[in-house]
Amino acid sequence: GSLVVFRETNTFRWFKEEVSGDAINFVKLFFDKSTNEAVNLLLETASNGEFKEVKEFKKSPREPFRYIYNHDKSTEQVESYLIDERRIHPTIVKTLIKKGLIRQSTYKGETDCLFVWGKSGKRVGVSVQGIVRNEEKYGFRGTKKRVGLNSEQDYGFNVSLGQPKNLYFFESPIDMLSYWSLHPELTDCRLIAMTGLQKKTVLNVLKHTLMSRTTQVYDIN
């Protein structure tokens, strides 16, 4: 899920393992080939006509985010998952549910935990975390992990505590809430889950924090 192929540059980035490269590196890594073997495989594939000419890649205009999720009347399953299984502090979970930042939703028979991205009082995205394991369907990670369609770029699930003077960035919402549970004394800070490791997210959230709040940011972690 953290593997991204960039068609514009014909390169890839595997954020989870902090690995990146070109087509040759891709073949070496995922097909377990040496450099010579990777080059030969690519040439052989091309000579067999399996590579087709690709028209210039143009990105379509990005549509605005639409919050399409239906909430369950109960949050019992989400609370059980976060508190009993992931060991998030009950007070944190119940507070975020009350604020509407955590929701329980069912889609195609699967119950999900929704981490709602808030920005200046508006919903601008959502992280979807499945709470029932299914290795056959979701592989080694075992559960669904998705970002809602057209969620705002370079942003993420976030919580502000007091007047943010320090910013804490995390790879996922669960990581973020786990850290908060271990450090309940946190105050005057902003916690942000980037859904990966994204430099642009750090810069964008820093800019938004400075512009939307009358505060000075002293530290970024």
Image: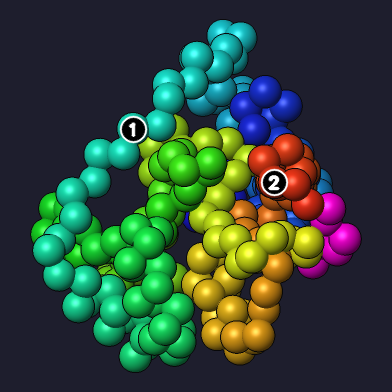
Q: Earlier in the sequence, mark 2 or mark 1?
A: 1
22 vs 100: above or below: above
Q: Around disc 2, counting alpha carbons within 10 Å, would you say few (fewer than 14), some (14 to 19), or many (20 or more)? A: few
How packed is label 1: few (under 14 Cα within 10 Å), some, or many (20 or more)?
some
Residue at horizontal 61 percent and vertical 23 percent from the top = 47
**Which amino acid type is marked by label 1?**
Arg
Between residues 132 and 182, which one lies in front from this camera angle?
182
Badge 1 element: loop
Residue 60 lies within the magenta run: no
Q: Which residue is mark 1?
A: 66
Where is residue 205 shown, x and y percent of the image? 69, 46
The secondary structure that most of the magenta stretch takes on is: loop
Residue 144: x %, y % from top left: 35, 62
Residue pictured at 70% horizontal, 68% vertical: 188
At a point 38% along the width and 61% down the height, the residue shown is 99
Label 2, label 1: how far apart the Cα atoms are: 26 Å
In what element is the residue under mark 2?
Answer: loop
Q: Amino acid at mark 2?
A: Arg
Magenta-drawn segment: 216-221
| Residue 1's disc number | none
Mark closer to the observer (2, 1): 2
Q: Split into 4 quadrants, where in the image is the C terminus?
A: bottom right
What residue is shown with label 2? 213
Viewer can see residue 27: yes
Image: 186 above or below 195 = below
- Whole-percent x, y for residue 150 in the image: 44, 33
